[in-house]
Structure formats: structure tokens, C-alpha cells
Image (tube, helix red, strand yellow):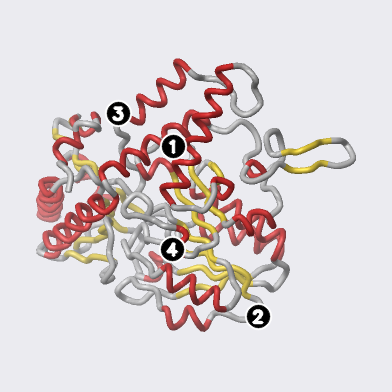
């Protein structure tokens, strides 16, 4: 285990006050705070190494390119991908999913073909496929969720047929905290000859991910949720799949040769990286991954699982408490309602106590409909949160509840 008090010193924002109260930041599923090491690495590059990458012969361009490609290697190592050719930089999980939906759909799907998603998906993993549905007439098949917030795996296996082309599911629910049995999901799909895309936005920050062990064909995550900067993310794709997909966008960087008659495309992964990349953000992402790796992903998982268990124990003691998501494998997120108190009222009043939580449908409206609610309050934990902050949350909820 690591010293949480020492770690918190790396995050200056955690020392500020809100409305005269110490900040208790529990909105980590939306975005985490950034350690000074990440910000300083990006500042250093802007001040001393800034130049466009890959195409320049001058010293700064060569140095910036080395940093950018070193960041790609850091990501490869973090995910245990086989090759840096399988690591595509994007703007985040949303763009990564859209890339796969657009390119895979263009190459391999036609009217009447099907994609399997789940009832607990983020909108990014629903709307991307609905856009394809509007263009090509594909069909979405949905894995249902049981009352405890777990996927109905028996129903999942029944969804496959001769028109199933791809499975696209979340690793961890951003509402329920459910950790899905991804390896089993992949094995079932592969038994039918179907590839799998995993939305790893809510798993990558919290525990070790090994894409080769998972066996998935595509995996997406966002930099800003794993202590890196906003505006950068990653799509991992098995090389044999990325080779077969058409480009997502056209422009500089992704070309081999261009004429008005014919264009050839660059080798992987540049085929999917049109235009100037956010090469400073890639350095920040690499520094963030180095940071969590130094703490140890197993240590981070143990700390956050302990916080989650403690939070569930404290919150269950509050009269009128309703918690959504009671899966056996539960991670770093607690979504709840208290009595008839509207989630926006609860969130607003907790904010006046210095406690930052998320309210609303959390970009998962179908899941809200499944549980018959308009929205929830969501507290989500990170490597720097403490038991004292969980206590502050429980005491704050109790105080707000008494007002109603």
C-alpha cells in the first residue's frame, strides 16, 4: 500500500476550499484531478521541446517525435499490447468507440447485421452504433441487466445469430460500479467468430488491464480519467483488425502517397491519426501512466475497493437510502437516492458543504429507465480519496436528508 497523505501532496487542488469548506472531491468517474508531475511534464515540453512531430528534420521536431513515440510505447506497456502498431491515439474513449463503429461498420456490416451492446452502456457506446444504424440499417441487440446491476449472461449467449458482427460492452459501469466478466464475454463472442470492443474508460484508472489476457479485439480508454490531460485517449486494436479497417479521417500524417487519381495510406497506427496529434498531451498521458504504475495498480485497486466497501457500509445506515448496483464485483462507484429527495437537490446541497458529487443520468439514460429513476447522485473514488472523505459524504447526506 502507499501513503495516501503523501500522494495527496501531488494534487494541489485537493488542498483548496469550496464555500469555506475543505474540498471533498468525489466526482472522479467524470474526471480525476491531475498530479503536478503530469502538469510539469507538459509545461516542460511546451517551453523547451515544442515542435510538430514526424515530418520535421530539425532538432526540436525530432525530439518531440521521440517523446510522442515514447509515450506510445508507455501505453503499449501499460496495456500489455503486443506492438505499438496496435496503439492509436484519439481524443478519448468516445472518439475511439466512434472510430471502431464507423470503420468496422463501413468494412464489415450491411443492412440487417447486428451489434450486441448492454443495458448499462454509456451513451457513447449506444449512439455511435445508432448513427451506423441510421446509415446502414444495422440492428442493436441488448444484454439485459438484473436487479443487482449485473449482466444477464444467459441472455447474452442467446443474442448471437448468423447476423451478429461485433460485441461492444463496457468493462465497468459508470453508474453501478459493476465490473463485467469481460473474459467470459470475449470467449463467448469468439466462439461465434465475433470480435469484441471493450469500453475501458472506468476500468483503466482502477485496476491493471492486460489486453492480451482479456483477449479483446479492441479496447478504449481516456487520458483524463487516468490522471492524464483532457483531449487524449487511446484505441487499442489487434493488428490484424486494424489492418483490415479503412481510415477514419483523411488528411496529413495518415497517408503514404497522394495524387488526384489515387491515395495510399500510412502503416499502422498512423493510418488512423490524421492531422497534427496532441503530442504534448501524449507526454502528459505517459507521465500519468508512469505515476499510477509507480504506485502500483494492485495497490490502487486495494485502496479503492476498501473505500468502496466502507462507503457502502456507511451509506446503507442512512434512513431512506437506495443504492443502485449491488454486484458481487463492484468498483469505485456508488450511485444512490435518498427517500424522495431529488438528486439535483441532494447534489446542490452537498456542494454547499464542499462535497463534489455528480448528479443526473450519467450519460446512461437506458439504464436509468431500467431501474425506474430519472437520475441518481453518484460518488466515485480515486487513489487519493480517504475514509475521512467518505465520512464527510455520509454526514453530509444525513444533514441534507434532515432538511427534507
Q: Are marks 1 and 4 in contact (CB under 8 Å)?
A: no
Q: Are marks 1 and 3 in contact (CB under 8 Å)?
A: no
Q: Residues within 10 Å of mark 1 (few under 14, many from 20)?
A: some
| SS for dot 1 | loop
Q: Residue at x 39, y 74 (%)?
A: 151
Q: Are marks 3 and 2 in contact (CB under 8 Å)?
A: no
| 387 is higher (above) or lower (below) than 156 | above
Q: Position of residue 234 (x, y in %)?
A: 50, 46
Q: Position of residue 88 (x, y in %)?
A: 56, 45
Q: Which mark is residue 162?
A: 2
Is 244 placed left or right of 38 in the picture? right
| SS for dot 4 | helix
**Measured Cα–Cα span from mark 4 to mark 2:** 27 Å
Tell me which numbered mark, 3 or 2, is placed earlier along the sequence: 3
Q: Quadrant of residue 133?
A: bottom right
Q: Single out the mark in the foreground, 1 or 4.
A: 4
- On the image, numbered disc 3 is attached to which residue? 36
| 49 is higher (above) or lower (below) than 356 | above
Q: Residue at x 51, y 49 (%)?
A: 94
**Measured Cα–Cα span from mark 1 to mark 4:** 28 Å
Tell me which numbered mark, 3 or 4, is placed earlier along the sequence: 3
**Measured Cα–Cα span from mark 1 to mark 2:** 40 Å
Q: Residues within 10 Å of mark 4 (few under 14, many from 20)?
A: few
- On the image, numbered disc 4 is attached to which residue? 213
Q: Position of residue 40 (x, y in %)?
A: 35, 24
Is 52 placed left or right of 220 in the picture? right
Q: Residue at x 41, y 61 (%)?
A: 171
- On the image, numbered disc 1 is attached to which residue? 230
Locate the C terminus and report the quarter of the image it occupies. Answer: bottom left
Amino acid at each position: 500500500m502507499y501513503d495516501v497523505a503523501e500522494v495527496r501532496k501531488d494534487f494541489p487542488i485537493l488542498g483548496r476550499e469550496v464555500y469555506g469548506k475543505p474540498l471533498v472531491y468525489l466526482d472522479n468517474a467524470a474526471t480525476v484531478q491531475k498530479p503536478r508531475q503530469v502538469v510539469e511534464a507538459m509545461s516542460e515540453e511546451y517551453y523547451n521541446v515544442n515542435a510538430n512531430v514526424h515530418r520535421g528534420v530539425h532538432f526540436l521536431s525530432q525530439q518531440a517525435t521521440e517523446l510522442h513515440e515514447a509515450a506510445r510505447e508507455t501505453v503499449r506497456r501499460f496495456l500489455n499490447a503486443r506492438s505499438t502498431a496496435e496503439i492509436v491515439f484519439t481524443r478519448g474513449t468516445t472518439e475511439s468507440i466512434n472510430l471502431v463503429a464507423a470503420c468496422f461498420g463501413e468494412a464489415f456490416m450491411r443492412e440487417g447485421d447486428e451489434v450486441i451492446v448492454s443495458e448499462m452502456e454509456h451513451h457513447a457506446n449506444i449512439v455511435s452504433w445508432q448513427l451506423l444504424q441510421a446509415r446502414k440499417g444495422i440492428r442493436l441487440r441488448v444484454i439485459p441487466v438484473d436487479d443487482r446491476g449485473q449482466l444477464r449472461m444467459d441472455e447474452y449467449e442467446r443474442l448471437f445469430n448468423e447476423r451478429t458482427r461485433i460485441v461492444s460492452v463496457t468493462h465497468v459501469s459508470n453508474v453501478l460500479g459493476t465490473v463485467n466478466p469481460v473474459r467470459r464475454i470475449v470467449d463467448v463472442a469468439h466462439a461465434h467468430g465475433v470480435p469484441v470492443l471493450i469500453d475501458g474508460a472506468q476500468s483503466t484508472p482502477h485496476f491493471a488491464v492486460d489486453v492480451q489476457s482479456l483477449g479483446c479485439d479492441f479496447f478504449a480508454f481516456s487520458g483524463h480519467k487516468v490522471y492524464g490531460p483532457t483531449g487524449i485517449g487511446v484505441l487499442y486494436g489487434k493488428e490484424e483488425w486494424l489492418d483490415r479497417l479503412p481510415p477514419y479521417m483523411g488528411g496529413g500524417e495518415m497517408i503514404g502517397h497522394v495524387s488526384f487519381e489515387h491515395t495510399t495510406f500510412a502503416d499502422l497506427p498512423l493510418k488512423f491519426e490524421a492531422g497534427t496529434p496532441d503530442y504534448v498531451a501524449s507526454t502528459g498521458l505517459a507521465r500519468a501512466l508512469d505515476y499510477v504504475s509507480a504506485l502500483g495498480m494492485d495497490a490502487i485497486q486495494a485502496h479503492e475497493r476498501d473505500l468502496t466497501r466502507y462507503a457502502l457500509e456507511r451509506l446503507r445506515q442512512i434512513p431512506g437510502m437506495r443504492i443502485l448496483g449491488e454486484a458481487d464485483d463492484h468498483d469505485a462507484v456508488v450511485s444512490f437516492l435518498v427517500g424522495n429527495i431529488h438528486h439535483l437537490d441532494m447534489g446542490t446541497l452537498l456542494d454547499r458543504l464542499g462535497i463534489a458529487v455528480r448528479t443526473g443520468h450519467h450519460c446512461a439514460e437506458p439504464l436509468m429507465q431500467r431501474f425506474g429513476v430519472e437520475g441518481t447522485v453518484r460518488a466515485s473514488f480515486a487513489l487519493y480519496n480517504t475514509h475521512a472523505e467518505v465520512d464527510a459524504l455520509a454526514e453530509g447526506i444525513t444533514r441534507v436528508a434532515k432538511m427534507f
